[in-house]
Image: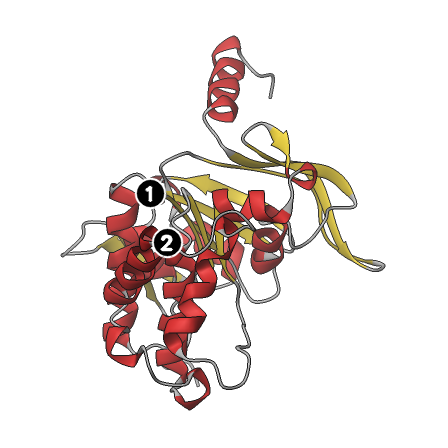
Amino acid sequence: MKKTEADIRNAAAAESASRLRADNVTIQYEDRVISRDLSVQIPDGSYTVIVGPNACGKSTLLRTLSKLLKPSVGQVLLDGKGIAAYKSKEVARKLGLLPQSSTAPDGITVADLVAHGRYPYQSFIRQWTDEDEQAVMSAMRLTDTSELSHRFVDELSGGQKQRVWVAMALAQQTPLLLLDEPTTYLDIAHQIELLELFKDLNEQGRTIVAVLHDLNHAARYATHMIAMRNGQLIAQGDPREIVTERLVEDVFGLKCTVIDDPVSHTPLVVPLGRDRSVN
């Protein structure tokens, strides 16, 4: 389909309004290509959620956007500049990352681990300040980890550790926050608590990008959704517009019905399951 002038103008406006984007990137591990010619723009001020089946390239895309992976073709742009041109500390002052799995040094306390989030601001001439201390205390308060501050990280449960890692990412106080499966290991109450926290941060002006497995959580909280399959972008936009029975079947291979969530009035995916009337 031929693009109209309005389509071109809208695409240009979206691109100029995006601090973080990937342009025609090919991502691979050695000889195995994960994504080819993939272009993604993260709308500024959005709560963007990336969804898709296991091993579809969601986490790989997030790692590429954060400079942990270098595309073999194309580039990631941060504030209009190739992210590869930034020093690591420069990136870490603009973009916070919670990776899918993290390992803390043995014998480190919660407070000391969260304090690592202030590393991008430290230098020979700038040592620890009251501002750093306040950032750490605020991050622990927001994640309900203050009472754990003197405990050793390796003594904590999986859910407690996950909240501590989130606190470390929050302590960076970056305008962009990338989260790879942030609700892993958490019970349902703490999942909702964290997702609500990210919503609050987004409403305060921070751009959130999260990989989530739960499609209904994604549809409820995202202002912008990216749906992937086999390393490619299948759909993106407002969940209210793109989450349909057809999309869920195309992306996940799942037959379902999509209804209006009675609480949030966002799409609610109800799996149909197997027809047990057939013998």
Which element is circle 1 on?
loop
**Of callouts 1 and 2, the N-terminal one:** 2
Identify which amino acid the numbered label 2 is placed on. Thr
Residue carrying label 2: 129
Residue 267 in the image: state x and y as whole percent. 28, 52
Q: Is residue 27 above or below residue 193?
A: above
Name the foreground residue: 141 vs 137. Answer: 137
Residue 32 in the image: state x and y as whole percent. 80, 60
Which element is circle 2 on?
loop
Would you call the spot at circle 1 few (<14 residues within 10 Å), some (14-19), or many (20 or more)? many
Q: Is residue 54 above or below residue 128?
A: below
**Residue lying farthest to the bottom in this orientation:** 155
State left or right for residue 217 relative to residue 153.
left
**Residue lying farthest to the top in this orientation:** 5
Labelled disc at residue 223: 1
State left or right for residue 23 relative to residue 244.
right
Q: Residue at x 41, y 85 (%)?
A: 152
Q: Residue at x 47, y 64 (%)?
A: 116
Say whether residue 12 is visible: yes
Q: Quadrant of residue 79?
A: top right
Name the foreground residue: 226 vs 208. Answer: 208
Residue 83 in the image: state x and y as whole percent. 64, 39
Name the foreground residue: 244 vs 224. Answer: 224
Q: Is residue 133 above or below residue 247?
A: below
